[in-house]
Image (cartoon, helix red, strand yellow):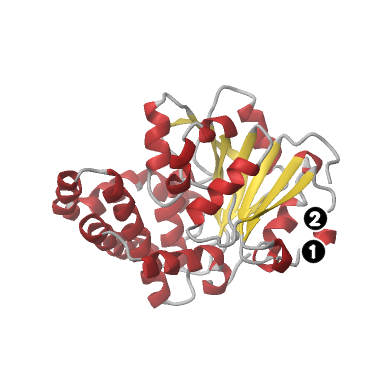
């Protein structure tokens, strides 16, 4: 039901409403909830079992049936195409926005930015594994860093001008996955990115066991390498694989600023930095395998299990 003109569409891919219930609750607390369009991408509306009470008050709620939500990149693309607001946010089952989040994003999108990255924080500050995973994935956009124009952004947990994404056409189905395909295309088109730490969102990270944590770190690198391998000429993938001993060094150097900011503003648990170093090595190993051999279908599904049900793999979430 439409109660107001939607200014921001939030796209969520899920297997069942219970997987996004907490996210929807946080979205329902937005100061401009009535201006939000919630786009739920799922295998079947008949098995979604939504909480109608939780969905009241949004400007619109759309359910997009895709038969399967795997691969999730194609499901995200279906949500993008179904959305009607001029700005859309690609959310996750385990990322929780603060009440002023949506309004803050729209302030920046009223300016000529094509991509606005929110300020991210750790939702489960339960130990070094969670912090290491968070810093590897989102440390560049830690909410304590200064706002301003930025040269890159994560693939999701990001607000886009919808028209900019739609310009990718059929390529969108494979682009909204791990790696840098969207932003390589955006940079080639002269698109501009802005970091808005005032739009805060808390991200949950795998931390329940070292085995699961290491598996997710490996898979995150694997899919980045595999997706680049799909787009790149073979010689370039081989060169990156040969240069792999430098990858952890380069990544750690890039992370120096966010790590210092986290140390200044947070009480990081002991062994966070060693866990970060270990995670970078494991991630690099996965990236090398991805460059040389690609990723198997079961490995993609294993990573998407973490993405859909990450709350199952945490030791605690605030």
Residue 262: x and y in percent read 46, 51
Residue 85: x and y in percent read 68, 35
In which quarter of the view is residue 316 placed?
Answer: bottom right
- Residue at 47% x, 27% y is 192
In this view, 279 is above or below 197: below
Q: Give the number of the disc on residue 164.
A: none
According to the picture, the residue beneath numbered tag 1 turns out to be 51
According to the picture, the residue beneath numbered tag 2 turns out to be 55
* 151 relative position to 122: left or right: left
* 288 relative position to 314: left or right: left
Asked which secondary structure carries label 2, the reply is helix
Whether pointer 1 and pointer 2 mark residues with C-beta atoms closer than 8 Å, the reply is yes
Q: How many marks?
A: 2
- Residue at 44% x, 77% y is 209
Q: CA distance from mark 1 to mark 2?
A: 7 Å
Front residue of 29/167: it is 167
Is residue 128 among what the camera can see?
Answer: no
In this view, 54 is above or below 184: below
The quarter of the image holding the C terminus is bottom right
């Amino acid at each position: 039901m439409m109660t107001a003109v939607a200014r921001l569409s939030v796209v969520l891919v899920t297997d069942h409403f219970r997987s996004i219930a907490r996210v929807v609750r946080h979205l329902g607390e937005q100061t401009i909830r009535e201006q939000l369009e919630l786009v739920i991408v799922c295998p079947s509306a008949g098995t979604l079992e939504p909480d109608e009470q939780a969905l009241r008050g949004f400007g619109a709620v759309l359910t997009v049936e895709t038969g399967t939500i795997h691969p999730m990149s194609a499901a995200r693309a279906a949500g993008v195409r179904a959305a009607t607001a001029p700005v859309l946010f690609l959310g996750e089952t385990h990322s929780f926005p603060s009440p002023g989040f949506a309004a803050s994003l729209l302030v920046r999108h009223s300016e000529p930015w094509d991509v606005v990255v929110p300020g991210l924080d750790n939702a489960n500050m339960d130990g070094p594994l969670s912090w290491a995973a968070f810093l590897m994935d989102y440390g560049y956009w830690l909410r304590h860093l200064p706002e301003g124009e930025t040269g890159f952004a994560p693939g999701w947990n990001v607000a886009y001008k919808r028209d900019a994404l739609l310009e990718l056409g059929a390529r969108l189905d494979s682009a909204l996955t791990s790696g840098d395909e969207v932003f390589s295309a955006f940079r080639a088109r002269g698109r501009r990115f802005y970091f808005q730490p005032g739009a805060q969102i808390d991200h949950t990270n795998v931390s329940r066991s070292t085995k699961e944590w290491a598996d997710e770190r490996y898979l995150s690198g694997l899919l980045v390498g595999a997706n680049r391998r799909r787009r790149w000429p073979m010689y370039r993938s081989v060169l990156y694989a040969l240069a792999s001993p430098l990858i952890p060094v380069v990544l750690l150097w890039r992370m120096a600023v966010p790590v210092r900011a986290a140390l200044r503003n947070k009480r990081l648990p002991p062994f966070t930095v060693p866990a970060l170093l270990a995670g970078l090595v494991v991630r690099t190993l996965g990236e090398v395998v991805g460059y040389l051999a690609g990723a198997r279908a079961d490995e993609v599904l294993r990573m998407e299990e973490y993405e859909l049900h990450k709350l199952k793999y945490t030791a605690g979430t605030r």
